[in-house]
Image: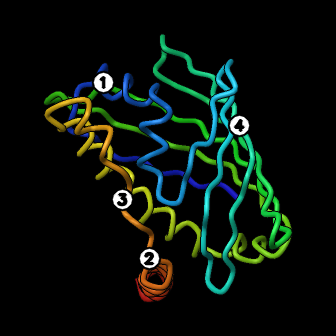
Amino acid sequence: MQITHSFDVARPLPAVWDLFQDVPSVAQCLPGATLEESKGGGVYEGKISVKLGPISATFEGEAKISADPANHTALIDGKGVDRRGGSRGQVKVTYALTEKEAAATHVTIDADISLAGPAAQFGRTGLIDEMSRRLISDFVGCLEQKMAAPSEEAAASIEAGEVKPFRLFWSSLVSWLRSLFGKKSG
């Protein structure tokens, strides 16, 4: 399943790039993510908890991050297993940062997600795409707060808000259904 998102951050490109290279800080802004350990060489161990409708999963695994500072791009190659529910997931994420006018940065994220097991049934719908849009919005808000913090200590204390799975699922479902009916009537 392919998911593409883009957003703007109201900060200059060098500042956004520096933050994206601070993996522990970025992990704090990913709803449901916990960074467990840096294994060196751009490899990180962690987990991410998700709730897709009636299925909840905590994927434990590793991600390798390969950054290209000259082009302000990076590849994140991750895989994980939900030991409790038996789902497996792999993700390849490419992000690119480009400079915009007025000291802003445009961020494009392309993700190729592969799910197996019980969680895979939700990969066939546009619902995951809609839920990811909402989570990306929370992620961007957290990044903005970190970059606007008055000190490093204040920035370190800023984390993604708690994901409210029931509210996220229903608001995403309603938005997805509106988009389906809007396309048919338009």
- Read off the residue under disc 2: 164
State which tag comes first along the sequence, 2 or 3.
Answer: 3
Q: Is residue 103 left or right of residue 49?
A: left
The Cα atoms of the two marked residues, 1 and 2, are separated by 32 Å
Instruction: Point out the image quarter for the N terminus.
Output: bottom right
Tell which of 8 and 155 is nearer to you: 155
Disc 4: CA contacts within 10 A as few (<14), some (14-19) or many (>=20): some
Which residue is disc 1 drawn over? 13
Q: Nearer the viewer, mark 4 or mark 1?
A: 4
- Please, what is the three-letter code of the amino acid marked with disc 1? Leu
Q: Amino acid at mark 4?
A: Asp
Q: Amino acid at mark 2?
A: Lys
**Circle 1/circle 2 CB separation < 8 Å:** no
Where is residue 28? Give x, y as percent: 44, 46
Q: Which residue is mark 4?
A: 77
In what element is the residue under mark 3? helix
Of circles 2 and 4, the one toward us is 2
Above or below, comparing residue 127 to residue 44 in the picture: below
**For marks 2 and 4 on the same chain, the one whose residue lies earlier in the sequence:** 4
Point out the tag, 3 or 4, that comes first from the N-terminus: 4
* Left or right for 117, reference 144: right
Residue indicated by mark 3: 138
Nearest-to-viewer mark from 1 and 2: 2
